[in-house]
């Protein structure tokens, strides 16, 4: 698409898409602080079945459709009945102009009475974020518009700490590869502890994704991680917002 050309909402609806939603739990309150929107087929097919249809020529339309579908699906599922936010993944490489590319998102949010501050935009460290200066412009624009921002899959890509030296986000979401078995892996605990210290000094909150066991949960609680996501709390719900459950207390807390 050429810069300056505006498409209607219906022009972005090129994939048979729906969304599943998985809660990101605030373990200090036991409630979801946000729901991450996860791409699915219109009948619940896997994300891979949709991603396989995306080509370089349709990547921009895919990114835009994901944003609109996520907002429409979350509101239809009852997002406005509570105070949880909505986390949407986006592709920095498709953003040729931050403000112009936000128009369908803003239009949809306004139409459904979803305040901008209820949205968090995540970009994956796994994907090529492109030029650091361009990415910073995108994130600064999103922040100015009232959106939250997050680095997803942190620790899985090539950028790592270099990325933190280039951009500032509200959240860092630790990749599940760092979380898996962290209760039995001292090196990963040390890495996560170091990232937490850096994030705290930079004014960024840490999320942990892929939490599946009580051991992982207990260890992350000890390290001070407040926001967690994973099968331990809830599996993604297709077209619905699972409430999620948090263990009443970590096992180490009961020991004094």
Image (cartoon, helix red, strand yellow):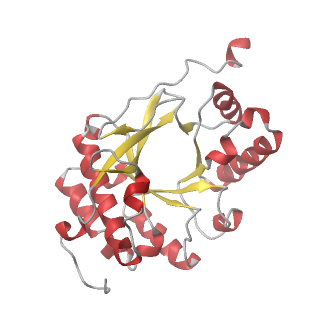
* Residue 238 percent coordinates (x, y): 33, 40
Residue at the extreme right of the image, as rendered: 186
- 82 or 52, which lies in front? 52
Q: Residue at x 62, y 71 (%)?
A: 166
Q: Residue at x 32, y 66 (%)?
A: 64
In the displayed structure, 27 sits above or below 194; it is above
Q: Give x and y (percent) for residue 144.
A: 41, 65
Position of residue 17 in the picture relative to residue 94 (left or right) = left
Q: Is residue 256 visible?
A: no
Question: Which residue occupies the foreground of this view, 200 or 181?
Answer: 181
Where 53 sits versus 231, above or below? below
Query: Which quadrant does the N terminus fall into?
Result: bottom left
Answer left or right for 161 relative to 173.
right
Of residues 182 and 144, which is closer to you in this image? Answer: 182
* Residue 191 to residue 139: above or below: above
Rendered residue at 72%/48% (across/down): 197
Q: Position of residue 159 (x, y in %)?
A: 67, 67
In the picture, measured across the screen, residue 176 lies left or right of residue 255, that is: left
- Front residue of 194/88: it is 88
**Quarter of the image where one finds residue 165:** bottom right
Residue 147 position within the rendered picture, expressed as x and y whole percent measured from the top left: 40, 57
The number of numbered discs placed on residues in the rendered structure image is 0
Quadrant including the C terminus: top right
Residue ranking furthest to the top: 255
Left or right: residue 45 compared with residue 199: left
Q: Is residue 4 visible?
A: yes
């Amino acid at each position: 698409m050429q810069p300056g050309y505006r498409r209607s909402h219906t022009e972005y609806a090129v994939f048979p898409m729906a969304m599943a939603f998985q809660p990101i739990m605030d373990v200090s309150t036991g409630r979801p602080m946000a729901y991450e929107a996860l791409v699915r087929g219109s009948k619940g097919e896997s994300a891979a079945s949709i991603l396989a249809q995306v080509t370089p020529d349709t990547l921009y339309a895919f990114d835009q459709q994901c944003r609109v579908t996520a907002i429409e699906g979350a509101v239809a599922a009852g997002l406005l009945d509570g105070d949880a936010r909505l986390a949407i993944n986006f592709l920095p490489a498709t953003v040729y102009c931050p403000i112009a590319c936000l128009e369908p998102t803003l239009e949809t949010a306004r139409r459904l009475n979803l305040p901008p501050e209820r949205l968090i935009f995540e970009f994956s460290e796994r994907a090529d974020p492109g030029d650091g200066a361009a990415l910073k412009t995108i994130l600064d624009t999103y922040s100015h518009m009232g959106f939250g921002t997050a680095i997803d899959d942190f620790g899985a890509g090539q950028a790592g700490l270099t990325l933190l030296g280039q951009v500032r986000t509200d959240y860092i979401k630790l990749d599940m590869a760092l979380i898996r078995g962290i209760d039995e892996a001292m090196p990963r605990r040390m890495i996560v502890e170091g990232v937490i210290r850096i994030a705290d000094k930079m004014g960024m909150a840490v999320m942990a994704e892929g939490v599946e066991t009580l051991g992982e949960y207990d260890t992350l609680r000890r390290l001070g991680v407040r926001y967690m996501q994973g099968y331990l709390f809830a599996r993604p719900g297709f077209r619905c917002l699972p409430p999620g459950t948090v263990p009443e207390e970590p096992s180490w807390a009961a020991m004094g």
